[in-house]
Image: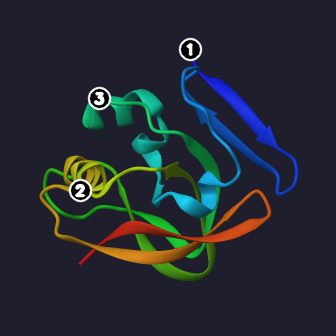
């Protein structure tokens, strides 16, 4: 069971476990990681990291989802693409170890680099990290 908390000032809806306390300040004080596809599922994130990580819907502009071409990778990767956008989620407070585990699970055996991207959460633009294939 999950709880949602809505913050009307910037239109954020944060999805979190009922025992987790979230505030709008989390979007400024905690690490942000943009994810897409399977990692928008809180249960999948918990399966990989061992905990539920609060998340909020987000849009990444000037990128597109593209079918991964590496062997054994079944999902999509992000590619720069002017004018396109990707709907995903931002994990709020994922530490570096958790971010690496998520990337490894979803992009393996591809090599990826961690990069800063600007995402839109509600109407609040913020810088988040994401993993892009090399």
Query: Rounded to the nearest whole Å, what is the CA distance between mark 1 and mark 3?
Result: 15 Å
Tell me the residue at 71%/51% (across/down): 24
Q: Which mark is residue 46?
A: none
| Element type at mark 3 | helix
| Residue plotted at (87% across, 54% down) | 9
Residue 93 drawn above or below residue 114: above
Return the residue found at the far bottom: 82
**Mark 3 and 2 residues: CB-CB less than 8 Å, in contact?**
no
Say which of 58 and 77 sits in front: 58
> In terms of sequence position, does the residue under pointer 1 or pointer 2 come before the other?
1
Q: How many marks?
A: 3
Q: Which residue is disc 3 drawn over?
A: 47
Q: Mark 3: few, some, or many residues within 10 Å (few <14, many ≥20)?
A: few
Callout 2 crowding tier (Cα within 10 Å): few <14, some 14–19, many ≥20: some
What residue is disc 1 on?
1
The image shows residue 109 at horizontal and vertical percentages of 12, 58
The extreme top residue here reads 1
* Position of residue 30 in the picture relative to residue 25 (left or right): left
CA gap, disc 1 to disc 2?
Answer: 26 Å
The Cα atoms of the two marked residues, 3 and 2, are separated by 14 Å
The location of residue 80, given as percent across then percent down, is 47, 80
The foreground one among 33 and 113 is 33
Q: Residue at x 62, y 46 (%)?
A: 56
> Which quadrant is home to the C terminus?
bottom left
In this picture, residue 119 sits left or right of residue 100: right
Mark 1, secondary structure of its residue: loop
Please name whichever residue, 114 or 54, is drawn nearer the observer in this view of the structure.
Answer: 54
Picture coordinates of residue 44, whole percent (x, y): 36, 32
Q: Which residue is disc 2 drawn over?
A: 100
């Amino acid at each position: 069971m999950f709880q949602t908390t809505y913050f009307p000032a910037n239109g954020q809806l944060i999805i979190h476990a009922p025992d987790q306390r979230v505030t709008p300040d989390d979007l400024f004080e905690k690490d942000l990681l943009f994810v897409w596809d399977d990692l928008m599922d809180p249960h999948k994130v918990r399966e990989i990291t061992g905990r539920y990580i609060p998340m909020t819907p987000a849009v990444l502009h000037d990128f597109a989802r593209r079918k991964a071409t590496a062997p054994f990778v079944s999902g999509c990767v992000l590619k720069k693409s002017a004018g396109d956008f990707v709907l995903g989620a931002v994990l709020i407070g994922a530490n570096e170890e958790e971010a690496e585990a998520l990337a490894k699970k979803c992009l393996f055996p591809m090599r990826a680099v961690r990069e800063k991207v600007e995402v839109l959460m509600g109407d609040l633009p913020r810088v988040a990290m994401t993993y892009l294939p090399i």
